[in-house]
Image: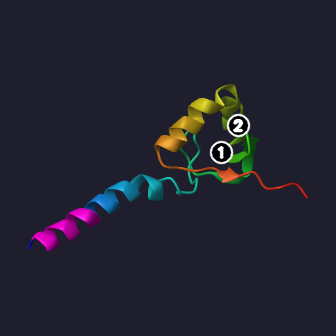
Amino acid sequence: MKKIKLVILTLVLALFLAGPVLAAAAPQTTCPVLGGKINQEVYTDHQGQRVYFCCAGCVDVFKKDPEKYLKEMKEQGVTPEKTPAKK
């Protein structure tokens, strides 16, 4: 009985610790400024990360305080794409 409890406790602990790692891998689906659905033709590259927006107006708002929006994205478990390498 003690072995079963130990195994269950170990599994629960492993899932608890793995949660933030798994959540951090979520792709961006919403605009960080207004929360609408992203348009993949509207984006900006910031420090090696590509951030998508719902409209061009949100790009300007983001550029005024990018760290604020990147922090919010991280807290929501959203990871921006890496900026593609130039050819």
Number of labelled discs? 2
Q: Which label sits on residue 53? A: 1
Q: Position of residue 12 (x, y in %)?
A: 26, 62
Q: Mark 1 vs mark 2: which is more N-terminal?
A: 1
Disc 2, SS: helix
Asked if the residue under mark 2 is in contact with the one under mark 1, i.e. CB atoms within 8 Å, the reply is yes
Residue 62 horizontal side relative to residue 45, left or right? left
Q: Which residue lies under the disc numbered 2?
A: 59
- Identify the residue at the far left of this view: 1
Q: Please report the bounds of the magenta region as a residue range.
A: 2-11
| Amino acid bearing label 1 | Phe
Q: Nearer the viewer, residue 45 or 2?
A: 2
Q: Where is residue 73 in the image (x, y as percent from the top left)?
A: 54, 42
Query: What residue is drawn where x is 15% and y is 72%?
Result: 3
Crowd tier of the residue under label 1, counting other residues whose Cα lies within 10 Å: few below 14, some 14–19, many 20 or above: many
Magenta: predominant secondary structure element? helix
Disc 1, SS: strand
Query: What residue is drawn where x is 64% and y is 27%?
Result: 65
Q: Does the magenta stretch include residue 66?
A: no
Query: What residue is drawn where x is 91% and y is 58%?
Result: 87
Q: Is residue 4 magenta?
A: yes
Q: Is residue 33 visible?
A: no
